[in-house]
Amino acid sequence: MNGKSCVRCGNKAQLKRPKTGELICKECFFVVFETEVHETITSSNLFSRGERVAIAASGGKDSTVLAHIMKVLNDRHDYGLELFLLSIDEGITGYRDDSLESVKRNKEEYQLPLEIVSYEQLYGWTMDAIVAQIGMKNNCTFCGVFRRQALDRGCELLKVDKMVTGHNADDVAETVLMNVLRGDIARLQRCVAIVTHDESGGYIPRAKPFKYTYEKEIVMYAYFKKLDYFSTECIYSPNAYRGFARELIKDLERVRPQCIVDIIRSAETFQFDTVNIRKQVISRCEKCAYISSQKICRACVFLEGLNSGKAKLSVFESEGKTQKSKARRVEEEEKVERSKVSILNADW
Ligand SMILES: Nc1ncnc2c1ncn2[C@@H]1O[C@H](COP(=O)(O)OP(=O)(O)OP(=O)(O)O)[C@@H](O)[C@H]1O
């Protein structure tokens, strides 16, 4: 920072704020970071006094900073919330077992009760065992469906009114882009909501206090506050499509940091043709009674597939697709592969 001054207090600047480009000292950065999250919480009336709130804690940087800041703001501004940590153990050796150790240390540091729910105990399967059966392709689909339900089940155990997650502005902007690129208007409409819940009240509302908080600032905050978190990527993670959206956002951010918040604000102001958006009809799964838009929920379809050794097929079935459409998709994939080969072999 070479002798430059903090734009807020005039002391020596120690960093450049990724979101605004301002030169600022560490203390002022903590103040603006915490104040902005507090403003997001109050301006959207995220909580009501007396609510029991679960913090979905993976042990990664986002949810570790979230746990820290929820504790700080709840005490400082007297929100009157009862806070809990909720972790899902997906059963990924060398990844989740290590990150859960960070959560356990945070539980001690912040003096918050912790509930850990595991895939093994809920479904009888760990992700290690699932990947051993189905391989790396599609494993994120299984994990996402199981995690969503596991978090809800954890919330039921804790009897909470709401859950908060560490999804940040970069995550939301990526999701907006992915939904635009896929033309998924229903999800596009839902993905910028700061609180998501279904109208029937079937699952616990989920809130994103970091909706406008930049990932880079979360990392800086965690670093300067010396928070205890686990920083390795999931060993099974490659979600190629989200990866592309992420890279695109990072490239755009390098040129114009404001773009992240602008993408979110744009999606917030879209006008949707609600008549033509298919409404999800929520009912209960006939097998496990978890909320579902189908007769059998996706987690049960996946479990049936895993238990009968036909897990790959269950991905299609869970999307309401038939054997015929699977055959069609395989045919299309083969066609693409053939055309790639002919392009490679072409005499340019
Ligand atoms: N195993 C888990 N247990 C509890 N909450 C989880 C778990 N995995 C994800 N979450 C919640 O979902 C949010 C987004 O998860 P994602 O997998 O995108 O991780 P991330 O962006 O790396 O976040 P983090 O840095 O907190 O791990 C997390 O911030 C956390 O609140």
Image (tube, helix red, strand yellow):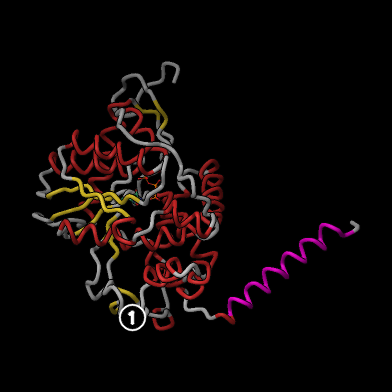
Q: Position of residue 215 (x, y in %)?
A: 40, 42
Q: Position of residue 24 (x, y in %)?
A: 36, 28
- Residue at x 38%, y 58% (from the top left corner): 125
- Residue at x 27%, y 57% (from the top left corner): 207
Is-magenta flag for residue 294? no
* Quarter holding residue 104: top left
Q: In the rendered view, would you say 32 is above or below 87?
A: above
* Quarter holding residue 3: top left
Magenta stretch, main secondary structure, is: helix
Q: Quadrant of the N terminus?
A: top left
Q: In the rendered view, would you say 258 is above or below 327?
A: above
- Residue at x 18%, y 53% (from the top left corner): 53
Judged from this view, the residue extending furthest toward the front is 308
Q: Which region is colored magenta?
A: 325-346
Q: Amino acid at mark 1?
A: Val
Foreground: 57 or 244? 57
